[in-house]
Image (cartoon, coloured by chain):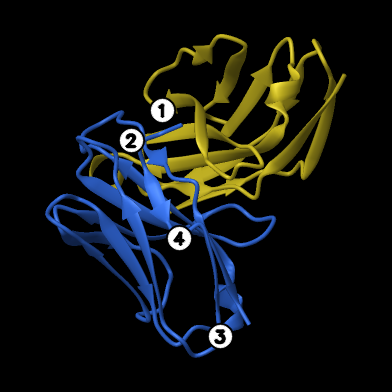
Chain colours: A yellow, B blue
Amino acid sequence: AQTVTQSQPEMSVQEAETVTLSCTYDTSESDYYLFWYKQPPSRQMILVIRQEAYKQQNATENRFSVNFQKAAKSFSLKISDSQLGDAAMYFCAGNAGGTSYGKLTFGQGTILTVHP
Amino acid sequence: ETGVTQSPTHLIKTRGQQVTLRCSSQSGHNTVSWYQQALGQGPQFIFQYYREEENGRGNFPPRFSGLQFPNYSSELNVNALELDDSALYLCASSRTGRATEAFFGQGTRLTVV
């Protein structure tokens, strides 16, 4: 079983600045994946970035990068050069590999506000 | 926008009634997962269907049931609706195998009165 915890209900950032969203997790699995999803007011969950636990290198996708600290069970998301379109609810999520892939456990979410 | 479509987008039901929500998966995807998202909360896994069979279930009572059809589309059925069933219901489709991405639909907002 997995648990995912986001301790920041809300965060705000100025346009063009950098913001970091925090996430901690707990799992007994050795094979697992971690994700950050974005949910704008349109409600559709959009994958931002994905990290495979066995990969030591932190994942990056354009302006989005993660800081994956496996021993500390920490998985934070850094958004660089923030844009107004980044404003949304962000969810950290995880799932085990193998036959459990696709069965996601989500955190409580962080609302990100971007100020012009 | 993904190829996952859900219907209806909104509906209102009375406590005790039954409801069916529908999901058309993205082309080439054979796995569908359903999630319940209460207002202001993260989604919670209900169950997953793979090749028309239930492939894992979260902590939801048996009155939550589902189906997957040969074209991989899926239904979520909820019997004896309770007020706490009011939520956004999300469907996600994916292919099997490691490192495949789950694509979500826009959800169905269910209100139970």
Give residue B80's quadrant in the image.
bottom left
Name the residue nearer the viewer: A101 or A75.
Answer: A101
Circles 1 and 2: CB distance less than 8 Å? yes
Q: Residue at x 23, y 39 (%)?
A: B29
Label disc, if present, on residue B14 of the rendered structure: 3
**Image vertical order of residue B53 relative to residue B96, above or below:** below
What residue is pinned by disc 2?
A31
How far across and how far down the image is residue A9, in percent?
A: 77, 45
Circles 4 and 1: CB distance less than 8 Å? no
Q: Quadrant of the C terminus of chain A?
A: top right
Q: Does residue B41 appear to the left or right of A98 in the view shown?
A: right
Q: Amino acid at mark 2?
A: Asp
What residue is pinned by disc 1?
A53
Q: What's the CA distance linking mark 1 and mark 3?
A: 44 Å
**Mark 3 — on which chain does it sit?**
B
How far across and how far down the image is residue A20, in percent?
A: 73, 24
Q: Quadrant of the N terminus of chain A?
A: bottom left
Q: What's the CA distance linking mark 3 and mark 4?
A: 16 Å
Q: Residue at x 37, y 24 (%)?
A: A54
Name the residue nearer the viewer: A63 or B12.
Answer: B12
Labels 4 and 2 share a subunit: no
Name the residue nearer the viewer: A23 or A49.
Answer: A49
Circles 4 and 2: CB distance less than 8 Å? no
**Mark 2 — on which chain does it sit?**
A
Q: Earlier in the sequence, mark 3 or mark 4?
A: 4
Q: Secondary structure at mark 2?
A: loop
What residue is pinned by disc 4?
B8
